Image (cartoon, rainbow, N blue to C red):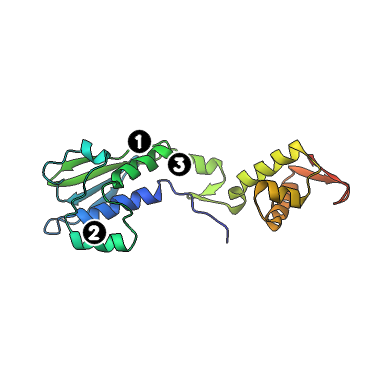
Amino acid sequence: MQRIEDLELPEGALRELIHNAIVHRNYAGFDTQMKVYDDHIWLWNAGELPQGYTLNELTKRHLSFPRNKRIAEVFYKAGFIESWGRGIQQVNEAFRAIHLSEPTIENQYGGTSTIIPRNTNFAQDNKANGSINGRKDSRKELAKNQQFVIELLRENNTLTATDLAGKANLGERTIYRILAELQKDGYVERVGTRKSGYWKIL
């Protein structure tokens, strides 16, 4: 019920690249192709860049000339395209945010290919964090909140659930659940009564 998918690549950026392939494809040419390798994903689309455009210009603010205007209009109205001419910039920003190299775009085989780097440490990191096939256990998803609650208790071990909820900007029921998990896993121990006791950090 609470599991959050932890994806290897920024989903919005990958969707943007696929949207570009659909909007800018030359439909008189070959099908769009995507191949997944251990260290990268190769996305190829029929139709080279518009005449006069260089690959370097794509990484800067530029005018957009969709090859298929009606498809582009539908995508825009559906909310798949947020702004014209900023898609590649947003993709690069998303990859930089997770410390991955930016995708490279080049004219190839009469079309446009995009080399999308993969996070080769993703599977290993997820294994270390208790993940299975890139999907984290719901308790692990609470790790940051658990850690924050522990830090609050280190500063003041007499805080009540209401106090913690206010400081952590979480609901009281969530705080009670976090405290129960922390006690169950042996991180904290309640000493004394609910009103006059305190939290012992283990």
Mark 3 or mark 1, earlier in chain: 1
Disc 1 secondary structure class = loop
- Locate residue 78: give its quadrant: bottom left
What residue is at 73 percent from the left and 42 percent from the top? Answer: 187
Residue 202 in view in this figure: no
Residue 30 percent coordinates (x, y): 15, 55
Disc 3 to disc 1, C-alpha distance:
14 Å
Label ID, residue 101: 1
Pointer 3 and pointer 2: residues touching (CB < 8 Å)? no
Mark 2 or mark 1, earlier in chain: 2
Q: Foreground: 171 or 179?
A: 171
Closest to the camera, between mark 3 and mark 1, is 1
Mark 3 Cα shell of 10 Å, populated few (<14), some (14-19), many (≥20): some
Type of the residue with mark 1: Ser
Mark 2 Cα shell of 10 Å, populated few (<14), some (14-19), many (≥20): many
Which residue is the site of mark 3? 122
Disc 3 to disc 2, C-alpha distance:
33 Å
- Locate residue 89: give its quadrant: top left
Disc 3 secondary structure class = helix
Which residue is the site of mark 2? 72
